[in-house]
Amino acid sequence: MNSSRPVPSVDAIRNCLKTVIDPELGDNVLDLGMIPSINVDTLGNVTIEIALTIASCPMRNTIKQNVIDRIEALPDVKSINIKISEMNKAQRANLMQRARQKAQNNPATTSIAPSTKVLAVASGKGGVGKSSLTANIAISLASKGLTIGVLDADIWGFSIPRILGVDGILAAKKKEAGIQIEPINKQVGKGNLKVVSMGFLSSEGEAIMWRGLILKRALQHFIEDVNWGPLDYLLIDMPPGTGDIQMGLSNMLPKTEMLIVTIPAKGAQKVASRAADMARKANLSILGVVENMSYFQCPDGNRYSIFGKGGGEQLSRDIQAPFLGSIPLDPSMAEKSDKGESVIDTDSPLSDPLKYLGEKILQQCPPASYMKSCTAYDLFESILKSDKS
Ligand code: ADP
């Protein structure tokens, strides 16, 4: 009897590791030389060695968990064993050489500082709660005392101002090199939101007339001409549709990570997987998948899967990206959003899952201010400074 079973190939694992981005250096762990060895035995047990710049790097657990999440999503993996080692001097020099080259090849042409973590929230299909989640993730992160930019790039159906309860007209100042737009600010606890949306440019009716004309250029304007100032995260509520916007984003902000929102229904999953394909074609890395409207929980505790079950986890397996969580269905989302209020820190069953999602993002894609104690971060900062001078 032939007892051999299918096992993942080392090439498949290498390809998968190309999607794991070192949060400090903004490049994938494989090309940075952080994976000295990969072993797969005949049963599908995978052993991966991760070489860190210093063994005590505070990003150690984040990188390890990212590797596990990605490899786990590969078919035929029986178990994963991670060995952590420390780079020697020559390996560290190679890594910094690569990081330096990358920084030189991608000079910042935007008003967004390289230290800002950029998360683009996409879904492929409208009505799955992409804008509601973007707004609530922004609140959850800002309530930690962080400064969050929110760019409502969903020009065809902008709703961020209403959901966040921010109103106003964007003020533009004339500068030598053109105009500079000031975002609208909203304080959230000790944190701050800086919001830019087509909804602040004119009335909704007027905007419909000319937004088609500027669709392609709008994102570029909002990225290049807004005075964002220092941000921990920039969340971009992406428009559904073709890959043009993703391509533009990857040229302007190559370190952008995509967050894919879906609902459990099969149809939504297929279009969401196309959004993931477009992101990958544009060389954008995928942070993970969130399933919205997963179930409705009755006061008696029974849960009903109104739109089906398991679509989010299936999508995360299909596109080999981590599954970041399920958000239930609750009427308070629409009620609160219409009043410009958040469901976070209310008695809504959405509050805890959304806060958990915020925590997951902080863990998987931590802001630069959380990484200041890492030697590699200091090294990288000094390279950027010396390259600029
Ligand atoms: P999208 O940006 O994907 O088009 P929206 O965020 O505008 O979707 O959400 C579509 C509708 O669904 C809105 O009325 C919103 O209030 C509602 N909604 C979103 N998420 C939930 C949820 N978890 N529970 C209940 N209603 C939700």
Image (cartoon, helix red, strand yellow):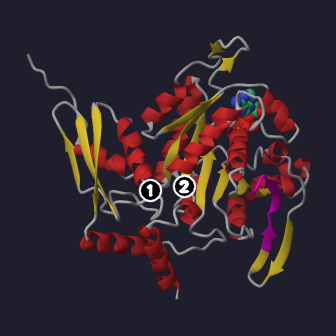
Q: Position of residue 178 (x, y in %)?
A: 77, 78
Q: Nearer the viewer, residue 72 or 268?
A: 72
At x 90% / y 57%, what residue is drawn? 168
| Residue stretch rendered in magenta on the structure | 180-191
Q: Is residue 361 left or right of residue 58?
A: right
For ligand 1, the image quadrant comes to: top right
Can see residue 124?
no
Q: Which residue type carries mark 1?
A: Met
Q: Position of residue 322 (x, y in %)?
A: 47, 39
Whether the residues at callouts 2 and 1 have beta carbons within 8 Å, the answer is yes
Q: Which quadrant of the view contains residue 222?
A: bottom right
Identify whether 260 is placed above or below 250.
above
At x 71% / y 52%, what residue is drawn? 142
Q: Which residue type carries mark 2?
A: Pro
- Numbered disc 1: secondary structure: loop
Q: Is residue 232 left or right of residue 158?
A: left
Q: Circle 2 sits on which residue?
A: 366
Asked whether residue 33 is drawn in magenta, I would say no
